[in-house]
């Protein structure tokens, strides 16, 4: 473990599984790991095994009643009281051992934080993490425990650091926002498809924090069919100046790749361009502002064959400063075509002729531009 970045991974991550018909299929982690390995971008010495999170660590953000409910659910899936915690719903089905599986993902993000804080690596990546919807006392949106929030609370408690959380998943990072809504030392920034059109419905520009934390929540909601140009320019024009003004000690970033035009659950029109550019900018910010301290997490991403492996290979390459070839290895393509029964892409970037045209492109860009300017005007002035 000597490189600039480490990759937190274990096959036990695959136990976080809501069943084969659920959109969050853990195979997406395996296919990504396989692509990274086949491309020679990830080696044994880059990999660190995740530890389990302790229940006391989960309790930094989750209520003891909720943690007990998750433990109970994993042991006795028939319990009817669990619905109060949004366990056993269509989004968050109960499965055996769910507490342990979810605790390992939180532990993975804590391992990432510890590796960076102990100076063993400058950056750490945990693609199983980024479960940003989980709330203090309930599950939400495929998320049982909120690994990002536990990691931030751990950094606040153990090191008293100023933490910046950057969430570029297609969905609003509502769980993390709610948990740190009044904390002036945690800047929570979320870029997402507008809540008018997409779960969880929140993330309006007027949600800016409360009490001492007023101004340390920033939301940038985007129109459906938003393309790379609006997405990347919002990061440059809004996220970067706010990051500089806030001057964090460490950045925790969430890289859900469900804003891709092929994602079945959302309506954005991003391409691999965004999934290369955003990690590049996040990495740059960590180097400029935080002496490199960066923990990068996965998140959503429901086109598990075509999008997730490429997007998170690009994520790792930007963070670990490695170059991915444009051609995907034939052996990888063949193997996963057999498993998925689908025709898989042969290149890292999206073939230009396959990217669908964007309806009302000009109107969408103008609306996004207006939103960006509003957020910019009401945000940087706080620091
Ligand atoms: Zn998402």
Image: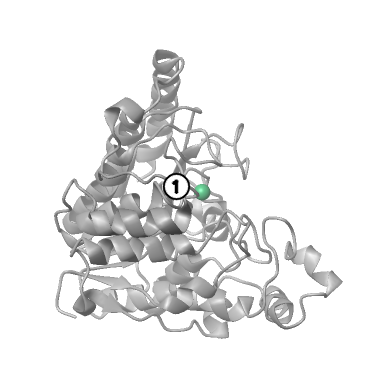
Residue at point 41% right, 60% down?
Answer: 185
Quadrant placement of the N terminus = bottom left
Residue at point 44% right, 14% down?
Answer: 363
Q: Is residue 138 left or right of residue 146?
A: right
Residue at point 24% right, 64% down?
Answer: 38
Q: Quadrant of residue 206?
A: top right
| x and y, in percent, of residue 317 in the image | 21, 57
| x and y, in percent, of residue 42 in the image | 22, 68
Q: Is residue 349 above or below residue 54?
A: above
| x and y, in percent, of residue 153 in the image | 47, 70
Closer-to-camera residue (102/302) = 302
Q: Is residue 149 visible?
A: yes
Closer-to-camera residue (327/5) = 327
| x and y, in percent, of residue 354 in the image | 35, 29
Q: Is residue 299 visible?
A: no
Q: Is residue 70 left or right of residue 7?
A: right
Tell me the SS state at disc 1.
loop
Label 1 crowd bin: few (<14), some (14–19), many (20+), radius 10 Å: few
Q: Quadrant of residue 82?
A: bottom right
Q: Is residue 108 left or right of residue 232?
A: right
Q: Quadrant of residue 116?
A: bottom left
Residue denoted by label 1: 342
């Amino acid at each position: 473990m000597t490189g600039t970045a480490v990759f937190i991974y274990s096959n036990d991550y695959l136990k976080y599984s809501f069943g084969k018909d659920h959109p969050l299929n853990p195979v997406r982690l395996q296919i990504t790991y396989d692509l990274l390995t086949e491309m020679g971008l990830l080696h044994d010495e880059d990999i660190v095994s995740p530890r389990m999170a302790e229940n006391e660590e989960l309790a930094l953000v989750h209520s003891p009643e909720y943690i007990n409910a998750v433990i109970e659910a994993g042991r006795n899936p028939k319990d009817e009281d669990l619905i109060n915690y949004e366990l056993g719903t269509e989004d968050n089905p109960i499965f055996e051992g769910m507490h342990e599986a979810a605790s390992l993902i939180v532990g993975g993000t804590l391992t990432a934080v510890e590796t960076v804080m102990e100076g063993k690596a400058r950056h750490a990546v945990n693609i199983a993490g980024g479960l940003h919807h989980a709330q203090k006392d309930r599950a939400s949106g495929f998320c049982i425990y909120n690994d990002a929030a536990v990691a931030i609370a751990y950094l606040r408690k153990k090191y008293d650091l100023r933490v910046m959380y950057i969430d570029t998943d297609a969905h609003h990072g509502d769980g993390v926002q709610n948990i740190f809504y009044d904390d002036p030392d945690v800047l929570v920034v979320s870029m997402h498809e507008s809540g008018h059109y997409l779960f969880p419905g929140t993330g309006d520009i007027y949600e800016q924090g409360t009490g001492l934390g007023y101004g340390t929540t920033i939301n940038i909601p985007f129109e459906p069919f938003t393309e790379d140009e609006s997405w990347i320019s919002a990061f440059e024009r809004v996220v970067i100046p706010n990051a500089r003004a806030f001057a964090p000690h460490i950045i925790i970033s969430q890289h859900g790749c469900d804003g891709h035009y092929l994602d079945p659950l959302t309506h954005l029109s991003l391409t691999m361009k965004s999934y290369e550019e955003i990690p590049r900018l996040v990495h740059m910010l960590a180097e400029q502002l935080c002496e490199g301290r960066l923990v990068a997490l996965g998140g959503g991403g429901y086109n598990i064959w075509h999008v997730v492996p490429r997007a998170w290979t690009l994520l790792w390459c930007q963070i670990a400063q490695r170059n991915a070839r444009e051609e995907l290895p034939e052996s990888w393509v063949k193997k996963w075509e057999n498993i998925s029964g689908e025709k898989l892409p042969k290149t890292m970037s999206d073939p230009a002729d396959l990217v669908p045209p964007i309806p009302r492109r000009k109107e969408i860009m103008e609306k996004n531009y207006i939103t960006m300017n509003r957020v910019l005007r009401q945000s940087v002035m706080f620091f």
